[in-house]
Image (tube, grey):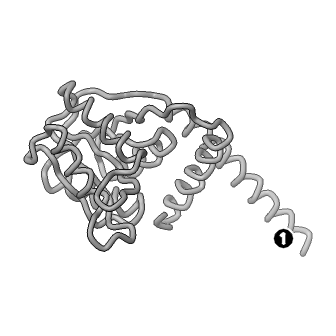
Amino acid sequence: MKRTVWNAAAVAVSVLLAYVAYLSVRIQQQSVRDEARPADVILVLGAAEYRGRPSPVLRARLDHALTLYQQHMAPRILTTGGAGGDPVFTEGGVGRAYLISLGVPSEAIIVETEGESTVHSVALAGEILRRMNLRSVIVVSDGYHIYRVKEMLRSRGLTVYGSPRQELNPDALHEQWNYVKQAIGYVLWRFGVPV
């Protein structure tokens, strides 16, 4: 009996590892695919901000979204992200201020400022889009992030395109680890664990 349980556990772990490996490959393939095309909104996933200034990662995402906006890919930009421990600023709010400073009209920017994780921000953004009757979205983030976010938004009935920000000199080993982390995050999300 014990041997049967151990064998079943070994098979289950093997299947899970194979699935994570498969997802990692799918995430890697998506990470370099720019699918930008006309949509209702450009969704920028939040990243760190430093006392009201976007971190280099957030700035790169916002700059990429600005380029898409200037190419008339969408008439609106939705910035996301909560406070992340900052008592004054939010990632979404900092993103909005940065885009306004670069000439984007404030009425073209929608802001989500409560999200504490990717799952939370995407859920809140999805609700905002539903209420505004916006049905198609271009997701802007780091490449490794796009697959999971697309799947979360698709589960809400949206048409989703990915457009990763450009990364200068990516570290191959670090990128591979990011694919695995996102695959694990995706599996956890599918099981209802909000990460």
**Image quadrant in which the N terminus is located:** bottom right
Which residue is drawn at the image coordinates 51% and 42% (left, top)? 144
Label 1 secondary element: helix
Neighbours of disc 1 within 10 Å: few (<14), some (14-19), many (20+): few
How far across and how far down the image is residue 120, in percent?
Answer: 37, 63
Query: Eyeballing the image, is 83 above or below 129?
Result: below
Occupied quadrant, residue 158:
top left
Number of disc labels = 1
Which residue is found at the position 79% from the left and 65% from the top? Answer: 9
Instruction: Evaluate whether residue 123 shows in this view.
Output: no
- Whether residue 92 sits left or right of residue 56 in the image: it is left
Name the residue rendered at 41%, 58% in the picture.
118
Which residue matches tag 1?
A: 5
Callout 1 amino acid: Val
For residue 67, side relative to residue 170 (left or right): left
**Of the pair 49 and 106, the residue shown nearer to us:** 49
Residue 97 percent across, percent down from the top left: 20, 51
> Residue at 21% of width from left, 51% of height from top?
96
